[in-house]
Amino acid sequence: KFICPTASTIPVTINMGYRMPAWYDITSLSEFDKEDKTGIMRSVSHIHGLIAEEEKSVPSDKIFVGGFSQGGAIALYSGLTYKNKLAGLTSDIDVILTYPLLINLLLTYLLNYGS
């Protein structure tokens, strides 16, 4: 079974406030600017909810989470902070989020970058 959630349509500051699908707001491309922690945590909470719903019929150690771009960042953050160990993660993460509390230290992951 595959579940492919789509980000909500929100105004994205770096794109002059244009409303578009995004998991969180991006204010600039500088690594020194503040992250949209509220938007990130809202998205992580949503993914945690999807995982919890799946856990009603599938053990968490059989659930694999992945994503692309912002979705990859949210997938990685969600998987690393989920209360139960997951089967694994995959991401093309090209953004750095504040390091989460690494609850799933023995988690299998595949991290991709580039084309």
Image (cartoon, grey):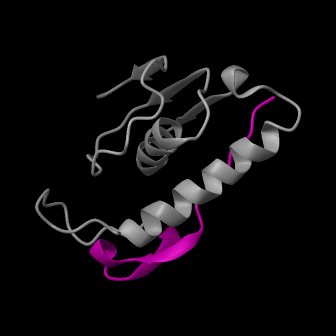
Q: Residue at x 32, y 74 (%)?
A: 15
Q: Is residue 90 left or right of residue 52?
A: left
Residue placed most toward the observer, 27 or 82: 82
Q: Is residue 36 left or right of residue 33?
A: right
Question: Does residue 22 appear anywhere in the picture?
Answer: no
Could you tell me residue 16's position as x and y percent?
A: 31, 81
Residue at x 70%, y 28% (from the top left corner):
60
Q: Is residue 4 above or below residue 66?
A: below
Quarter of the image for the C terminus: give it: top left
Q: Nearer the viewer, residue 68 or 90?
A: 90
Horizontal placement of 111 versus 54: left or right? left
Determine the residue located farthest toward the right in the rendered image.
57
53 drawn magenta: no
Task: Compare residues 100 and 40 and report the one nearer the observer.
Answer: 100
The reply to whether the magenta stretch includes residue 18 is yes
Q: Is residue 83 above or below residue 35?
A: above
Residue 19: give x, y in percent of width and height: 49, 78
Query: In screen coordinates, is 101 left or right of 55?
Result: left
Count of marks overlaid on the render: 0
Magenta segment:
1-23
| Residue 63 makes an appearance in the image | yes
Which quadrant: the N terminus? top right
Residue 24, how many percent across, how many down? 43, 65
- Residue beneath the point at 60% across and 67% down: 8
Quadrant of residue 92 in the image?
top left
